[in-house]
Image (cartoon, rainbow, N blue to C red):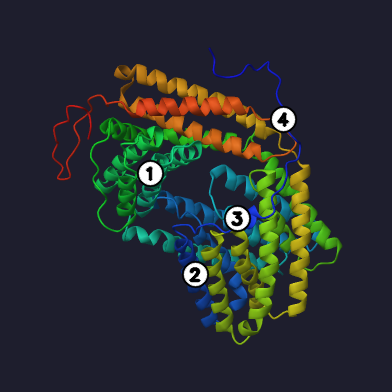
Amino acid sequence: MSDTPSDASPRPRQPFARGLPLAAPLRLNRPSDTWFKPALSVVVASAVPHLTLLALGRLDLVMYTMAGSLCALYGHGLPYARRARTLAGVVLSMTAGLAAALVTASLTHSTAVLVAVGALLAATQKAACDAVRIGPPGHVILTFVSSAALFAPQRLGQVPAHLALTLGAGAVAWLVCVGPALIRREGPERRAVARALEAAADRVAEPAPRTRHTAAAAVHAAWQCLLASGRPTPVRRSLERLVVHAEVAGVSAHPDQEPDRLRAWAALTRARGPVPEPPPAPGTAAELYGIDAERAALRASGGRRAARRTLLRSLGPGSHLLPVAARTLIGCALAGYLCAALGVGRPYWAIVTAASLYQANTTLTWNRTLQRTLGNLLGVLVFAAVLPLSRTGPLALVLCCLFFSFAAEALITRNYWLGSVAVTPMALLVLEFGGTHPAGELVADRVLDTVLGALAGFLAAALVTNRRAAGRVERTLEAAAQARTAAERAYADRAHTGPDGLDRARRALTARLVELREAADIAAGEWWQRALPEQRLLAAERAGHRTLAATAQRQGPPVRAPETRSGAVAPAPANGAA
């Protein structure tokens, strides 16, 4: 008997527009465990060019070096091998967006054209960042830089030198973010594995759908981090064994798996000492053999081509990212033209405000609208209070900007509105590098731009429908069912499939379940669409996690003999465990 309802059964209708929360989006959260890394990185990456320009008496060029320095905010959750490539891509993307803005600004002074280009750049940056899953701060920093440059005085002959400043500051940011690899090269992997162990411990202590999803996502993120970390090292081998334990605990949650032991391993893994050496979990050798095979497949040319095809599909005509990109385009254009019509001198602030609102669905966009509006309005008050201090001298202005850069990253993980309280005065102080402006004018323009940008941005989010969200749920349901069937088939035929095929199938199933939960959460907060198949979602998730639990308990088949740390070949364990 099938455990899923018939498609012919009537589907319950749901309200087109759901209730919007007021208090919940403003509650403070626990700070991120790595909040200090982007905070310190952006301060160091900004201090070097800022102080250099101060010594040369050219603080008017800070806007161009700041574009490169802000790249230091990206990639802190990635292993250093991938972080180096990702940051290089961010620096080049930042430079490309800035180049488009500067060339446009040098060729035309038409506000209508500048707003249109700003909205188009914002939509492109939003779609690209979502497609590659660059993570916080996402497209907002890119849009902030390109939009501001559109309305800065510019001559075509100045563009190459200004772009060179951005690239130079970007190189400094790259060195700041990648340099710690010389001290602790497995740091990001250790943190990812520690999070997986902590999530698995929570799953064992409190078996519930919420902790099950969190544990599955954390284990999947840890595997992805280890896959991207480069060649295996003894430390990474130990981390892989710890992830196997987290995976077993996360999918089965047996009472005999002590959460305190998992948390103790997590604490040791996160610390600077040796990585814990756990006892063998069932199938450890097969799991490690599987991840080796998957790593080799990803590094091969075929794996890279497949990754490129996946990226292109995510931006294709049927992509679920396009409605959000369309919202960004329309909302930013509407905000910019509205401010220009009212005579506001800096419509790019409204463009940036609108661009910063767009999240995965309408409900999350509403949350960000509240957070951005409150944070900007409070930030304007902070700016008014600190402005006299910043005008005591150029060094004071530089130090104020560095302080607010640090404060923004220190606070933003507690809640976006709290970080915006620091971001707003920093953005306003940047204008002071080019010359002083009347304080009342800056405050009034910022308040008006914030309110108009928030209203226009959310109006576009509410009116531009995203019916593809429900369609994505249907596609991820089918993909999860196919992945579960493949995992069960690989387990049943593991003698022929081999440990690498079985474990690739298991990790593929985990990825599909994580994607299914993400798609369901996004669709649940979207307006103007049909009701979600809640029963099918629940049944698919339960079936998928049952398959993961069953295959996680298997004893791995005999595999090649592992190498010891001295390089000698050790005899393979009889039970296949490493």
Relative to 84, say whether 43 is above or below: below
Residue 15 vs residue 196: left or right?
right
Badge nearest the viewer, 1 or 4: 1
The furthest residue to the top: 1
Q: CA distance from mark 1 to mark 4?
A: 37 Å
Q: CA distance from mark 3 to mark 4?
A: 40 Å
| Label of residue 201 in the image | 1
Mark 2 or mark 1, earlier in chain:
2
Badge nearest the viewer, 4 or 2: 4
> x and y percent of residue 552 in the render?
35, 29
Badge nearest the viewer, 3 or 1: 1
Mark 4 or mark 2, earlier in chain:
2
Could you tell me the amino acid type at mark 2?
Answer: Val
> x and y percent of residue 36 in the render?
45, 64
| Label of residue 530 in the image | 4
- Label 1 Cα neighbours within 10 Å, binned few <14 / some 14-19 / many ≥20: many
